[in-house]
Amino acid sequence: MKAFIENMPKAELHVHIEGTLEPELSFALAKKNNVSLPFDTPQALIAAYDFYDLPSFLKIYYAGMSVLIEEDDFYQLTWDYLAKAASQNIVYAEIFFDPQGHTIRGVAFDTVIKGIRRAQCDAENKLGIRSQLIMCFLRDMSAESAMEHLKLAEPYLDWLVGVGLDSDEFNNPPIKFKDVFALARKWGLKLTMHCDVNQKNTLEHIRQVLEEIEVDRIDHGVNALESDELCELIKSKGLGLTVCPVSNQFVVQSLTSGEIRDMLKRGMKATINSDDPAYFRAYLNENLIALQQEGDFSRSELKTLMANAFSVTWLPESDKRAYL
Ligand code: ES4
Ligand code: ZN
């Protein structure tokens, strides 16, 4: 079963590029950029990864960004992820990035997006892995800041396939960003938002992403299962749900294998993803292997999960068919 998972051509639709920063690269960049890290070795840094819910994870995730300064740093980060992804037989990836996590530290938007884009182009040419970029807004920052960053992206619209919403969901409902997402849609971008597991007002947030924002996809969205009505709506719209088993295990102490199977039984387009693989110490193969073991998933179920991923990608329909 492990070989079956490893050999399967795969798509990944929910991975934060800053969450792919491996401790070894973090140390190399810290040295180059004269940034001091409060650890002596990459192993000590990993040992300090102590998260048990979303805020405790996000604190460590944002602190980790401090070593990313130059365009080449964003290039190296993205190249390393795409090379690792290609080594796991991922043939297509949609990658999130968090520009506000960098501009807030004085790193220019252009520096970030140019480094990422150059690595995407090189990886496609040299490794054959295709990818598209999704710009995320931090929901615990203001709607005004999100709007400013959307406008910073205007010269680069050809480099973006969509926009997303991440970071701390507590008291930051989707509706807060209604105008920002409406403008993004007007500009031709696809829309997705995180509805993280077990958040306050989770069902109301899922309702908002469906009815008020009218997203094209939902990131996580596991709690929709508590409402037959929301499940029916997600199914009727054919929306993909990007579920992240190992990430869920950190936040809710479960790989949510039962919930993922339930989604498949209901005909919802669940997909499997890694979220922040360097922090959760699990890339896509490790997520699939852990999920298969916990839930005793069959080959046919794994094939369905991966077919779902390709079918809900934001590729042109004609390109999508080549993978299905
Ligand atoms: C994230 Cl696990 C998770 N949840 C929300 N926002 C995020 N950004 C990066 N990882
Ligand atoms: Zn995420």
Image (cartoon, helix red, strand yellow):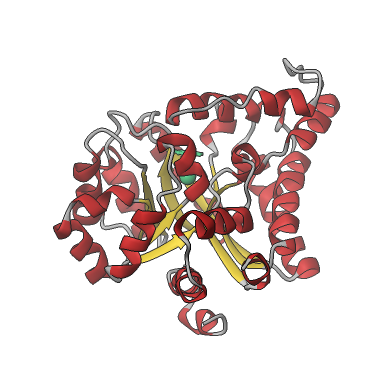
Q: Quick check: 4 left or right of 272?
A: right
Residue 140: image quadrant is top left
Residue 38 on image: x %, y %:
72, 15
| Residue 106 can be seen in this image | no
Residue 310 on image: x %, y %:
50, 72
Against 205, is 320 above or below?
below
250, 230: nearer the viewer: 250
Which quarter of the rendering shows the N terminus? Answer: bottom right
| Residue 93 can be seen in this image | yes
Q: Quick check: 143 left or right of 155?
A: left
245, 189: nearer the viewer: 245
Residue 259 on image: x %, y %:
34, 55
- Residue at image point 68% right, 25% down: 47
Q: Quick check: 101 left or right of 107?
A: left
- Residue at image point 25% right, 63% down: 234
- Residue at image point 27% right, 45% down: 178
